[in-house]
Image (tube, rainbow, N blue to C red):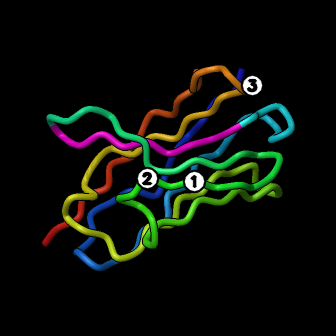
């Protein structure tokens, strides 16, 4: 099992930057992959970015490419999502998630953190 706790959301203006954090209760050696998802009001949850813990290989949704960065800090056991050049359409509740083994779904989720981008 792993517990995930997000933080770092808030209200910002378009064009600003925000860094989200996700503290994990387990070592990355026990986690295969971690990801960020988001859910805007009235919409389904969507994938934003993911990172494979053993290799650091990162992938991004088209909406995040070139603006967002995902990275892991081993010393703090924390996953980050650095979001730059934010747009109003980035407004959503952001969730981090973990999958412990290859082939398993994302079975562990944080409580979410709200990011609101005003125009």
In the picture shown, does residue 31 fall above or below 15?
A: above
Which of these two is toward me, 78 or 97? 97
Q: Which residues are magenta?
A: 33-41
- Whichever of labels 3 and 2 marks the residue nearer the N terminus, that label is 2
Q: Which residue is mark 2?
A: 61
Which of these two is toward me, 22 or 46? 46
What is the C-alpha distance between the residues marked 2 and 1? Answer: 7 Å
Q: Residues within 10 Å of mark 3 (few under 14, many from 20)?
A: few
The residue that appears at 83% across and 46% down in the rendered structure is: 54
Label 1–label 3 contact, CB within 8 A: no
Quarter of image, res 70: bottom right
**Residue 102 in magenta?**
no
Dot label at residue 101: 3
What is the C-alpha distance between the residues marked 1 and 3? Answer: 17 Å
Instruction: Give the secondary structure at mark 2.
Output: loop
What is the C-alpha distance between the residues marked 3 and 2? Answer: 22 Å
The residue that appears at 14% across and 34% down in the rendered structure is: 42
Instruction: Give the secondary structure at mark 1.
Output: strand
Q: Residues within 10 Å of mark 1 (few under 14, many from 20)?
A: some
């Amino acid at each position: 099992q792993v517990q995930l706790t997000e933080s770092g959301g808030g209200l910002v203006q378009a064009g600003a930057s925000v860094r989200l954090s996700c503290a994990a209760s387990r070592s990355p050696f026990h986690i295969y992959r971690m990801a960020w998802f988001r859910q805007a009001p009235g919409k389904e949850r969507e994938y934003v970015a993911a990172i494979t813990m053993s290799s650091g290989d990162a992938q991004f949704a088209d909406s995040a490419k070139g603006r967002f960065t995902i990275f892991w800090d081993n010393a703090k056991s924390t996953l980050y999502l650095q979001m730059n050049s934010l747009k109003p359409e980035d407004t959503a509740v952001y969730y981090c998630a973990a999958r412990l083994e290859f082939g398993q779904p994302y079975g562990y989720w944080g409580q979410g953190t709200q990011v609101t981008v005003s125009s």
